[in-house]
Amino acid sequence: MRPYINWIQDPGNQKSSMKRLRYRAGSLCQLCEFILTQTRRKHHLTSCYSSLAGITTQQRRPRKQFTLRSEHGELVRRLNASTRRFKSNNTSNVTQTLVEQRLYAIEQHIQGILNQKSENTVPEKDALEALQALQSVARATIGAPVVEKKDGITPASALLGLDANTSGPSISQSSPPQDIPPQYKTAVAVQVIKRAHDIIKHPGVFISPAILKTYVSVQALVGHPETLPEAFILYASKPIPKSNTSPTQYKSPNPNKASSAVPLPVADTALSAAIEKKDLSLALAIIDTTVCTAAFHRSKIIRRALPPLTGFALAPLAVYTLASQLSVYQDSMDTTMATNVAFAGILAYVGFTATIGIVAVTTSNDQMDRVTWATGMPLRERWLREEERAALDRVAGAWGFRETWRRGEEEGREWEELREWIGRRGMVLDRVELMEGME
């Protein structure tokens, strides 16, 4: 066995210099004992420092993190104070009492919003803070990570190179707190669902994209997305308060307007929650109220088709300018004729290339799995409704067999309903010639 060197801190020197004491031959067990002794000592010093820091923190007066400008400033201040206490605790310390205190502060804040008259508009910041608070409670109660403490350190673990943090807690990212009973988690989920729905249904709350995204995240987190289709309808058709009116007047929005379209990431989150809940009717309702609406189609045209169309409309002017410049560099024909010839050639090249690109984009089918377009579907509709087909493809993949060789053997009322619903949309579920072994 090789000898090892034992080092000690030199008490006579104020600098962090180390003094070699002596050489000593030691066995493997003595080396393990030395490592474990150093680890326990560091853990003891860390615990003492943490307790001392806790006493010092209690004696100091906490600072204000930001200035509150809300109409109910006192309620928001209590809510933020509860948020700081809620986040300062470790996940393992999320107890039923702490959740009840947090819910009480949120309840007071939401009551301040709901008690306002319908003539008064609720600031977006207040509604968003309430939804984010409900989201934090739901995440901590239902899906927060749990801390598993190590009972002890073995010599083998010390020799494997584990650092000093091994003596602390290790966090599992997918387990909820163990000290909260399931019945209480269900009660918290019901209360979170009800309060979040009350916020978006209040006449004075304008459902902005940020509020809709937070609301969908809350409902998906608690596992109850049944109210999401109604929320999407409210997002498109809820009356909008007019500015500079007292009392506040409301105007009816156009549900087919491009700004009324549900963002695609929000629709994907809602569909994932419905698929996880295994509710086919809910999944189809979410698809019908998000990617199947005229507002979504108009929004897609504006975002993705308008820039290329604008460039295609300006192409002749750019091509003519380029042709007139190229005609100067030749002397075989008249300048005007050379300009016309170059203009026609370049414009034909641009037009033919753009046409081939459009056909390639609208006829691509590499992303299709089980749901394909029916024969005779126009290319413009294929491109415009691609998100709808992709959503139905996800639903079919979730309800059908995962094994590719078993596709086509599904049966049952829900599967037949899904097949009929897809067929009425101009699509085909499990086209025979595209199935495995049927080429």
Image (cartoon, rainbow, N blue to C red):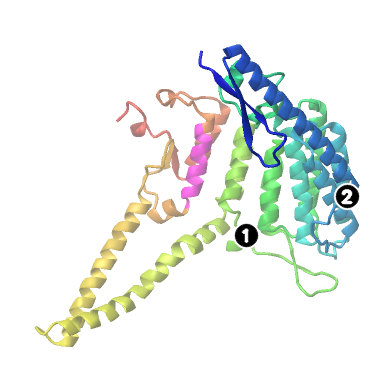
Which residue in the rendered view is the most extreme toward the front?
Answer: 12
- Magenta residues span 385-397
312 or 94: nearer the eye?
Answer: 94
Which residue appears at 68% of the width and 64% of the height?
A: 253
Q: What is the x, y in percent for residue 141?
A: 77, 34
Q: What is the x, y in percent for residue 257?
A: 60, 63
Residue 332 seen by the camera: yes
Q: Which mark is residue 195?
A: none
33 or 166: nearer the eye?
Answer: 33
- Disc 2 marks a residue whose amino acid type is Arg
Which residue appears at 66% of the width and 51% of the height?
A: 213
- Disc 1 marks a residue whose amino acid type is Ser
In the image, is 299 to the left or to the right of 93?
A: left
In the image, is 336 to the left or to the right of 114?
A: left
Residue underneath mark 1: 260
Q: Give the quarter of the image for residue 118.
A: bottom right
In the image, is 236 to the left or to the right of 79?
A: left
Query: Where 89 falls versus 129 (above or below)?
Result: above
Which residue appears at 79% of the width and 38% of the height?
A: 89
431 or 406: nearer the eye?
Answer: 406
N-terminal-most mark, 2 or 1: 2
Prevailing secondary structure of the magenta residues:
helix
Q: What is the x, y in percent for residue 120?
A: 85, 65
Q: What is the x, y in percent for residue 320?
A: 28, 79
Residue underneath mark 2: 60
Residue 99 seen by the camera: no
| 324 inside magenta stretch | no
Helix, strand or loop under label 1: helix
User: Cα distance, mark 2 to mark 1?
Assistant: 49 Å
